[in-house]
Image (tube, grey):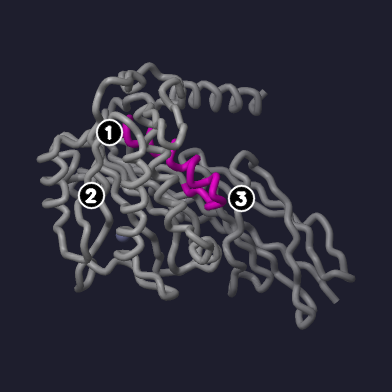
Amino acid sequence: MKKLLSMLCAFVLSTCFFLGTTDITSYAANKNYVVVIDPGHGGVGDRNLGAIYNGYMEKELTLQVAVAMKAELEKYEGVTVYLTRTADEIKSLESRADFAKSVNADFVFSIHFNASSEHIYYGSEIWTSAFGNYYQKGQTFGLIESDQLASLGLYQKGVKTKIGSSGNDYYGIIRHCVARGIPCDIIEHCYLDHAYDVQYLKGQDFIQTLGIADATAVAKYFKLKSSVNGNDFSNITYKTVKKPSGKVWQDTTDPDTCSIKVLAYDSASRNALVEMTTKDSQSPIIYFAYSYDGGKTFSPLQMWDRTQKTQSFNVNIPSSFTSSNIVCRAYNNYELFKQSNEVAIETR
Ligand SMILES: [Zn+2]
């Protein structure tokens, strides 16, 4: 009964989120849209460089993606595309938003690449405004963009909001665009400091591919048509998000629960079959990690099937361990984790 009730709640919730009536499905032909693409960072000094890892410089990649995105988007009819910068130069976030306002932009797409101080995360994440129509449009585009990036193989961390201590959107480019009446999403394509994502970056023409994916998402969102590449999204339907009544706050709490059981141990392969159950009522669980040394060291983050509450996996215990203390962690998409109970097993 409890399970049925929670399933019903989940259904009602998702219905509210995705099937709400909106004014943004009215994008149609015969209107000209103005799209501003913002290649993040640029110039020298501190934050202007962006992330630099594994020979990749964020400020260079953002411009390359933006140029490819513009070229692809210009194959569509009914859209005018601008870049906030075309050279390796310093541009303040305010001046980027001012420029978007001056050309009467319908949307600003800010192009970025990610890195974390822990160097453990991978995948794409999209940031949008926490407020009203800006959230509605930003979240709706973000879901389309996330699907597009997922189709390239990139792991998806989701479309998120973040409110700063001032009570406004935390990220400057979003805050400055919203202050000027323009919706804005930040697209963090992937992590420059994680091998899982770098393997994609090393792929031939991957930067070009990202630009095309971004442009295709924009074309879908505005329901554009291209006689050049033969795409016609004028009749496309997509999930539209309901306008929220208040601010959409970020999740600031760890997952609710995380518990493990060791189902079996195979002494030949030295694999322990671990079953983990985890739940976060606010955000999806997206990664998990395991430890066989009582939490002193953890595995790289593994992908968690976010449609499941319970999953099992093998933990391989090194032959030097005569006993093992297994403990796991579940991470939500705000990178907050809950540590499980510890299970001791004999492995000799
Ligand atoms: Zn950046």
Ligand 1 is found in the corner quadrant, namely bottom left
Q: Which residue corresponds to mark 2?
A: 83
Residue visible at 41% across and 36% down in the picture = 228
Residue 256 rendering spot, x and y as whole percentages: 52, 45
Residue 76 rendering spot, x and y as whole percentages: 35, 34
From mark 3 to mark 1, how far is it between C-alphas?
39 Å
| Residue placed furthest toward the bottom | 320
Q: Which residue corresponds to mark 3?
A: 304
From mark 2 to mark 3, how far is it between C-alphas?
37 Å
Q: If the image is split into quadrants, where does the C terminus sit? A: bottom right
- Whether 155 is among the magenta residues is yes
Q: Which residues are magenta?
A: 135-157
From mark 2 to mark 1, how far is it between C-alphas?
13 Å
Residue 124 rendering spot, x and y as whole percentages: 45, 52
Q: Secondary structure at mark 2?
A: strand
Q: Which residue corresponds to mark 1?
A: 79
Q: Which numbered disc, 3 or 1, marks the residue closer to the eye?
A: 1
For this rendering, which residue is in front, 231 or 33? 231
